[in-house]
Image: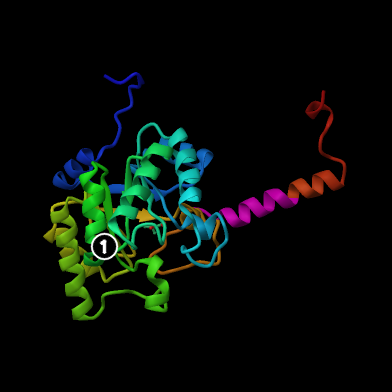
């Protein structure tokens, strides 16, 4: 029995599997801090991903490589404190799981223990299978990530669409099957042709969540700063913007500065 009482039904890996079976689409967004995660969770998103994209949108790095395990744990614990319903998945950052499976397990355990997250996500297929198996055998749910895997950006050279050629497409399908057989509860497919992503979603029984992977998958994920239009200079074709917060926020900051300079703020009602 839980000591926490809440009427909210939490999203679990089993709920996500049921959603796939019922052909109910899964919604996923990134989240990195308490205030934003609270809004995202109250809107009813199914999964919040504490993505290593925090390295880009929160810390201003060019790639996801520099973010550390301690920094991911900081972001994840802030999100966990806000969330009542969504499943919270945390990226294992670059360099914390590729070396060997023992290190992978201790990284995953640190995330689960120190942040209270519900699952971890790792980038890659056959080459990291041993790490995935070891994490799963400790009872930690694992989400896979195939296609464009940003932690390998220096191997790819660019952020262009992956798996357009047959050889890479076939390897991706084999990797998806391996992840399913290993026991991953879901797979993210990033920036690959829509027909290939559809084929993967029809081949494996676990949920497949796409970003730039078309509409034939079981759910969608976007980086929250991108869909809100905070990162206004980033405009890939797959991105739907639901707001232009860059302009709206900049306008609010400009008005505040004007009000301070003109001595309009604070007025009599705004003081003690
Ligand atoms: O780090 C991240 O935001 C991600 C998503 C793009 C899937 O991995």
Quadrant of the rendered image containing residue 148? bottom left
Q: Please name the predominant secondary structure of the magenta segment in the image.
A: helix
Asked if residue 122 lies left or right of residue 115, the reply is left
Q: Is residue 247 magenta?
A: yes
Q: Choose between 155 and 268: the one closer to the eye.
A: 155
Quarter containing the N terminus:
top left
Please tell me whether mark 1 sits on a helix, a strand or a loop: helix
Quadrant of the rendered image containing residue 14? top left
Quarter containing the C terminus:
top right
Q: Position of residue 47 (x, y in %)?
A: 34, 44
Per the rendered image, the range of residues in magenta is 243-254
Q: Choose between 148 and 73: the one closer to the eye.
A: 73
Q: Position of residue 251 (x, y in %)?
A: 68, 53
Q: Choose between 246 and 160: the one closer to the eye.
A: 160
- Does 251 appear above or below 2? below
- Does 34 appear above or below 134? above
Residue, disc 1: 128
Q: Position of residue 68 (x, y in %)?
A: 48, 55
Q: Position of residue 79 (x, y in %)?
A: 46, 40
- Asked if residue 43 shows in the view, the reply is no
- Does 45 appear above or below 66? above
């Amino acid at each position: 029995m839980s000591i926490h009482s809440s009427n909210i039904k939490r999203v679990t890996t089993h709920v996500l599997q049921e959603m796939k079976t019922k052909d109910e689409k899964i919604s996923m967004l990134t989240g990195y801090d308490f205030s934003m995660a609270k809004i995202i969770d109250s809107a009813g998103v199914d999964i919040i991903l504490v993505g290593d994209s925090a390295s880009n949108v929160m810390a201003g790095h060019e790639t996801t490589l520099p973010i550390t395990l301690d920094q991911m744990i900081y972001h994840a614990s802030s999100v966990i404190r806000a969330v009542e319903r969504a499943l919270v998945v945390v990226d294992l950052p670059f360099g914390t799981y590729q070396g060997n499976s023992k290190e992978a397990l201790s990284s995953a355990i640190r995330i689960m223990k120190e942040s209270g997250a519900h699952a971890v996500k790792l980038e890659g297929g056959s080459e990291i299978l041993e790490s995935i198996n070891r994490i799963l055998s400790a009872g930690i749910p694992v989400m896979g990530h195939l296609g464009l895997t940003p932690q390998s950006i220096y191997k790819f050279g660019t952020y262009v669409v992956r798996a357009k050629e047959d050889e890479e497409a076939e390897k991706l399908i084999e990797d998806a099957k391996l992840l399913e057989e290993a026991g991953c509860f879901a797979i993210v497919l990033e920036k690959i042709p829509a027909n290939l992503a559809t084929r993967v979603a029809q081949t494996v029984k676990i949920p497949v969540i796409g970003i730039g992977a078309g509409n034939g998958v079981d759910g969608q994920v976007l980086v929250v700063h991108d869909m809100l239009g905070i990162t206004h200079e980033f405009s890939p074709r797959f991105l739907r913007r639901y707001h232009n917060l860059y302009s709206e926020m900049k306008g609010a900051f400009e008005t505040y500065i004007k009000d301070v300079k003109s001595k309009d703020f604070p007025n009599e009602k705004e003081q003690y």
